[in-house]
Image (cartoon, grey):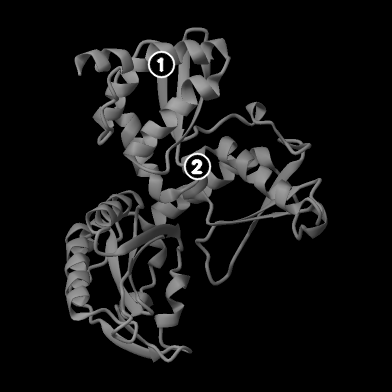
Amino acid sequence: MSFLKNIFGKKDEPINSYADFWSWFQKNEKVFFNVVKSRQNIEKGFFDKLSPKLAELKDGYFYLAGMDDDNTVELVFTADGNTKNIVFVEELVEQAPEIAGWKFTSLKPPLDIKNVSINMSGYDFNGDNLFFYSNELADYPDEIDISIVHTDLTEDNRKIIGNGTYIFLDNYLGELDFVNNIDNLKVIGRQEAEKDLVPIAKLKDFLNWRQKEFIEKYEGIRYDTDEDEHSMLEAELESGNKLFAVVNTQLLEWDSKASHPWIAAITFKYDGSNNNAMPSEDDYESLNHIEESILQELLDKDGYLYIGRQTANNERDVYFACKDFRKPSKVFYKIQRDYSNKFEIEYDIYKDKYWQSFERFRPH
């Protein structure tokens, strides 16, 4: 047996934690360093080895690598715009060891406009052909709604120009500020513009000003749900199946919704084939237990407001409005791992400053 081990080598230990990943990385970092510095076969010599190890840790890690200077490789880990994975990228880099010749960065950092010029599918994206203006929404004054104008956009290239513009903004603003500071974004051509155009180089200052105003307006705001009453709602779907919801309709009338701009939604899929698409008694108890465990983690005093739940068509959805996206990302991911043997579980975290997702639950 030992003879065979010597021939084939030891198999890598499984990656179950950040420490496991960095231990593996340290064992291989000198080879990786030389591959990147030589600029030859980076895909095969580095990325093809890095990617499966990150996937063992968790889906959703992306990366960029290059020479920061003659003696330092910078490895940037990114969530590629997926909000619910940002906290895991940040934690991975926070636990990175000091390794000579390496610089580890979480999320794409902001760049000076002079250093951002992208060419994609034959089109350029830079400070010369990109402009913007802000749209004021009377009913949603805190929303940052931006129109980006690319001077070469036509109906034929709209998708290409749109994708390239998003990549440009991700690099120019930085990944975290792009996620935090823009609520709605539309890419249009010059002929569609309805306002005077502002050079894209001024976008960063504009967003920082709006974000500072927003923070000052809502800093310290808290909502206590202890005294709220939840409403029971029932509806019949087109299929004839029932929909049941338990919703904090009092919370939905709150005038400071924008202070909790992130919606965290988790979906549990169960087998309701023998119960008119409703959960069985056993599943019902399990779902209630899981929901209670989430409520113990996501507390209103910490900025996580329970909006309610909806049950229909073999699914239960549970909703929270949140001041930040990091803790819900971790709580929901743990729930997904812990109960994947019982339910198919999906979750999402998205920006919705005025909770428009829940208008259907409000009395009209």
Residue drawn at x 62%, y 45% as measured from the top left: 166
SS of the residue under disc 1? strand
SS of the residue under disc 2? loop
Q: Quadrant of the C terminus?
A: bottom left
Q: Is residue 96 visible?
A: no
Q: What is the crowding at mark 1: few (fewer than 14 residues within 10 Å), some, or many (at least 20)?
A: some
Closer to us: 215 or 339: 339
Q: CB atoms at circles 2 and 1 under 8 Å apart? A: no
Three-letter amino acid code at the position of disc 1: Trp
Residue 28 quadrant: top left
131 relative position to 358: left or right: right
Residue 103 x, y percent position in the rendering: 41, 19
Residue 251 x, y percent position in the rendering: 32, 75
Residue at numbered disc 2 = 80
Residue drawn at x 23%, y 78% as measured from the top left: 228
Residue drawn at x 40%, y 59% as measured from the top left: 348
Of labels 2 and 1, earlier in sequence is 2
Q: Which mark is residue 102?
A: 1
Residue 105 quadrant: top left
Residue drawn at x 80%, y 57% as measured from the top left: 155
Q: Which mark is residue 164?
A: none
Q: Quadrant of the N terminus?
A: top left
Q: How far is mark 2 from mark 1, CA to CA?
A: 22 Å
Three-letter amino acid code at the position of disc 2: Asp
> 202 above or below 249?
above
Residue 85 x, y percent position in the rendering: 39, 46
189 relative position to 94: left or right: right
Closer to us: 147 or 29: 29
